[in-house]
Image (cartoon, grey):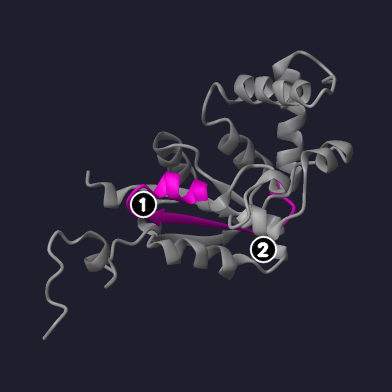
């Protein structure tokens, strides 16, 4: 498959919808040259969100280990050393957050789509995300606040972490006929080997 056909899954989370940032977020992806091939607004249930976060069978262990390591790196003592207990709390908070209101689910297509979207979105924690990223520019939340409030971090967007994750997430959120194959005029500039046909 040509790299220009790579696809990634993106969801504007309930906080992004409530803050009227859908257009701003879409604009960031369009400006870099990605093509929107699927989009819908949905209210999801607990089962769907749990499925989404546990598509990777290692997610519970990895998330728990990363959270514990993050606590220790900040000189904090985690409430438990069991990564699965940690992830139980993380998942409960994610479910509560992601089912609290509408979510805009999208599929974006283009060369290096997964990495590009991750770069544009920024790090998971808005406080430490770079200026110029979606999270760095539009959110003031931090792990300190979300942990203190025992809630999920509010960071506007979910973006697939890898091409493999993206394929699984797209299958979970979209039916095949909900995505559209079409051409954009700009693709000639982005991908054609010989840029021709511009001058008359």
Residue in the image at 76% along x and 38% along y? 93
Q: Is residue 136 left or right of residue 79?
A: left
Q: Is residue 33 magenta?
A: no
Residue in the image at 52% along x and 61% along y? 40
Q: Which residues are magenta?
A: 98-119
Locate the C terminus and report the quarter of the image it occupies. bottom left
Residue at the top extreme, as displayed: 81
Question: For mark 2, what is the residue?
Answer: 17
Question: For mark 1, what is the residue?
Answer: 176
Where residue 123 sits: x, y (%)? 61, 43
Residue in the image at 71% along x and 40% along y? 94
The picture quadrant where one finds residue 74 is top right
186 vs 150: above or below: below
20 vs 169: above or below: below
Residue in the image at 52% along x and 27% along y? 56
Any part of residue 13 in sight: no
Tell whether label 1 touches label 2 (CB within 8 Å). Answer: no
Please tell me how crowded label 1 is: few (under 14), some (14-19), or many (20+) other residues with Cα within 10 Å: few
Give the tally of numbered discs.
Answer: 2
Where residue 163 sits: x, y (%)? 40, 38
Helix, strand or loop for disc 1: helix
Where residue 50 sits: x, y (%)? 63, 35
């Amino acid at each position: 498959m040509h790299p220009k056909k790579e696809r990634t899954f993106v969801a504007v989370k309930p906080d992004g919808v409530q803050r009227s940032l859908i257009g701003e977020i879409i604009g960031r992806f369009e400006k870099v040259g990605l093509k929107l091939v699927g989009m819908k607004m949905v209210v999801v249930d607990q089962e769907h969100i749990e499925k989404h976060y546990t598509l990777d069978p290692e997610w519970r262990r990895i998330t728990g280990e990363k959270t514990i390591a993050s606590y220790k790196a900040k000189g904090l003592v985690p409430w438990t050393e069991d990564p699965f207990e940690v992830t139980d709390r993380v998942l409960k908070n994610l479910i509560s957050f992601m089912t609290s209101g509408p979510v805009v689910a999208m599929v974006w297509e283009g060369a290096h789509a997964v990495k590009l979207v991750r770069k544009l979105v920024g790090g998971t924690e808005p406080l430490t995300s770079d200026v110029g990223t979606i999270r760095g520019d539009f959110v003031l939340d931090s792990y300190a606040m979300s942990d203190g409030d025992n809630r999920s971090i509010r960071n506007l967007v979910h973006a697939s972490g890898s091409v493999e994750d993206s394929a699984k997430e797209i299958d979970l959120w979209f039916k095949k006929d909900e995505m559209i194959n079409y051409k954009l005029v700009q693709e000639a500039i982005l991908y054609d080997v010989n840029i021709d046909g511009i001058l008359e």
